[in-house]
Image: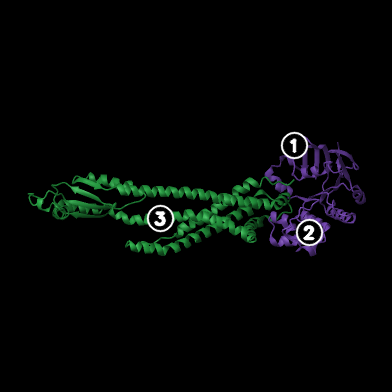
Chain colours: A purple, B green
Amino acid sequence: MIHFDNVSKQYPGGYEALRQISFRLPKGKMGYLTGHSGAGKSTLLKLIALIERPSRGQIILDGVNLSHISNRQVPYVRRNIGIIFQNHHLLYDRPVFDNVAMPLVIQGYRHKEIQSRVQAALDQVGLLKKERSDPITLSGGEQQRVGIARAIVHKPSLLLADEPTGNLDPELSLEIMQLFARFNQVGTSVLIASHDLDLIQQVGAKALSLKDGKVLHDEITPADTIVGAA
Amino acid sequence: MANGPQHNSLISAYFIHHARVLLGSLGHLTRHPLSTSMTMAVIAIALTLPTGLYLALNNISGLSAGWDSSTRISLFLHANVNEEKAQTLVKRLRLHNEIDHISMISKEQGLEQFKQLSGFGNALQFLEGNPLPIVLVVQPIINTDHPNQIKQLLKELESNKLVDIAQLDMQWVKRLYALLEIAHRVIWAIGSLLGLAVLLIVGNTIRLDIQNRRSEIEVSKLIGASNAFIRRPFLYTGFWYGFSGGILAWLLTSLSLFMLAEPVENLALLYHSDFQLSGLSFGDASSLILISCSLGLLGSWLAVGRHLDEIEPS
């Protein structure tokens, strides 16, 4: 699904966020990205979502070389990805339903289908009763789950999550992680960036550790999991 | 995309989406009635001024068309031309499509008038014959767009072998056209400047709107909205500004006209004229609203083009 080949990212001013990263996340698998803040986790996710472009190296996403994607084509790549942010990125001027419906509206779905898909997504995150609520009235965990519903409502083949449990207590965090595991079970590839090593050990998934923009070590080598090669 | 919407429904979905955005942007405007109506009013005032000037010029042109009847070409025929030949010429000239009206002053009528008006009546008795030629008074059709046409007509008439002298008092006609031409240009200049102002007003309003909806734009880009999708509501907003501003300008112009109609009529009566103010025709009103809509669209298009690219998720 994701294939990084010697990818480096240098920001203007010389700061090198990623250095020669190579790894592979096979289709339908779930992987974690760990490391302290500033290790380059967010940058790596941004490269996949085409929010940033690599300085060197190649990224292949679902068989497509991202360096061949023009700015005009970027939206269409993103439509196949669901992104979850630490700070939810919800819009507070509209109810939960409208927030979750956004990816479908953008892709031109019909009203009826939007209705049923949004309800299905909200049901999956356990917030069906809150569809008419304003996001501001929800708790942090609930807001995060609205964000997840928005990321999965259009059934993307890849889910990216950047510190999805950053502001949540351990119990809620575990719940969220289990939610991701459920999506993975139905075939969605998932890549989660998190600094919470305890949590990752708890769910027992494969991880790629970054430190100062380099792959520190990968606890996993089998071909069907994240493979790092520095 | 395998899980995208059905292809055959895409086209109708496209139109449904446009209709939705069109109404959505209108809804967005009505949720902020104060700022919307202020923008609308500024656009309307900026458009009312040139429209009013245009109407004033139109009315003056209409008024001066009445004066055109005093523009005459006098044809002094050669002394040896008799009345019979003159009549034939009159008949022929009546068919000329640039001549509105033609009348003949015979030698006798001319002498009579001369006696009465000149004060030389007694002296004329000593003349053996009538020295005056036959005069044809030609009233040309005046085409305000082609003031040179009269000159051409004059030349043409002068070249007729029966005609000795063709005379036209062009001076005041020229002055009038020169004045109207200047007024025309002034209105164009004012109109263009105020049109530019409308463009800037809409552009600036849309720019603020884009800033206010920054997070919405960021999130939309992150979940795969194309630039066209993000641009659309702002373009429609600009359209609505232009449309409502145009309608309001039309109303303001009509209202001013209504308020002016009676005093103008009173003034005209004092001059024994049945002059009446003419308002905006249907064509004029449609052009006004069309121009206004285009300015709104163009203004928002410029703002969107400049500011939307600056907002990228990070």
Q: Is residue B26 visible?
A: no
Relative depth, front residue between A79 and A195: A195
| Chain of residue at mark 2 | A
Alpha-carbon neighbours of circle 1 within 10 Å: few (<14), some, or many (≥20)?
few
From this view, report whether residue B167 is shown above or below residue A118.
Answer: above
- Identify the residue position indicated by label 3 in the image: B58
Q: Secondary structure at mark 3?
A: helix
Precedes in sequence: disc 1 or disc 2: 1
Marks 3 and 1, how far apart at CA: 62 Å
Residue A12 marker: 1
- Identify the residue position indicated by label 2 in the image: A121
In the image, what residue type sits under mark 1?
Pro
Residue A154 image position (x, y, % from top left): 75, 55
Mark in front: 2 vs 3: 3
Q: Is residue B242 left or right of residue B94?
A: right
Q: Residue at x 85, y 51 (%)?
A: A166
Residue B141 marker: none
Alpha-carbon neighbours of circle 3 within 10 Å: few (<14), some, or many (≥20)?
some
Q: Is residue A78 visible?
A: yes
Residue B245 image position (x, y, % from top left): 55, 57
The reply to whether callout 2 and callout 3 are in contact (CB within 8 Å) is: no
